Image (cartoon, rainbow, N blue to C red):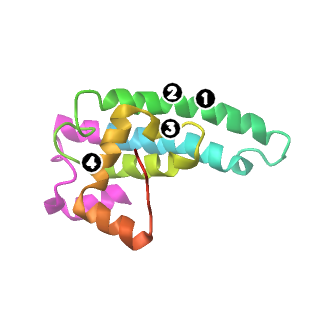
Amino acid sequence: CLMHAIDRHPDCGLAPEPGTAERGEYYKWLVWMTNTLQESGGAWAHPENWAPDEATRPKVRAAAEARLGRHWDMAESGLAGRPYLLGESPSGADLFLFMLAYWSRGYPVRAQDRPNLAAHARRVMARPAVARMMAAEGAEWELG
């Protein structure tokens, strides 16, 4: 959905040009986040979707928590020395990472507890469109 919306509006500047190495990096981050990071967050937040019996749910949550730690570390490393996932300019991948990081504020392993991810969230949240969306949704996030 995000990729389609951005592709329909290339003038928004939120994706590198098709066919470039940067576009491959953009796809890499988006696919990894949807298939790995978001899956682990979902398993932690909704273990009932992975384990129909209540007795197994604590194990599902514990495993998801361990994966989340590793996944946030990977995203943290990806931001080392750069303000955004692809470098100096934000992309749709940064908006998606921001959403997942925002969701993590209730997790035991949070994005905001890593310095690069916290700084990234502050940068994205300072964007006028994101600030308007947060205000319209009544969403707040204290990053310290």
Which numbered dot is residue 123?
Answer: 4
The vertical placement of 113 against 144, above or below, is above
Picture coordinates of residue 111, whole percent (x, y): 46, 39
Which circle's residue, 1 or 3, is located before the other in the chain? 3
The amino acid marked with disc number 4 is Arg
Structural distance between the alpha carbons of marks 3 and 4 = 24 Å
Structural distance between the alpha carbons of marks 4 and 1 = 27 Å
| Residue matched to label 3 | 36
Residues shaded magenta = 1-26
- How many residues crowd around disc 3 within 10 Å: few (fewer than 14), some, or many (20 or more)? some
Q: Are marks 2 and 3 in contact (CB under 8 Å)?
A: no
- How many residues crowd around disc 1 within 10 Å: few (fewer than 14), some, or many (20 or more)? few
Helix, strand, or loop for circle 2? helix
Which numbered dot is residue 66?
Answer: 1
Name which residue lies at 19% across and 37% down.
22
Q: In which quarter of the view is residue 60 placed?
A: top right
Q: Are marks 4 and 1 in contact (CB under 8 Å)?
A: no
Name which residue lies at 46% across and 35% down.
113
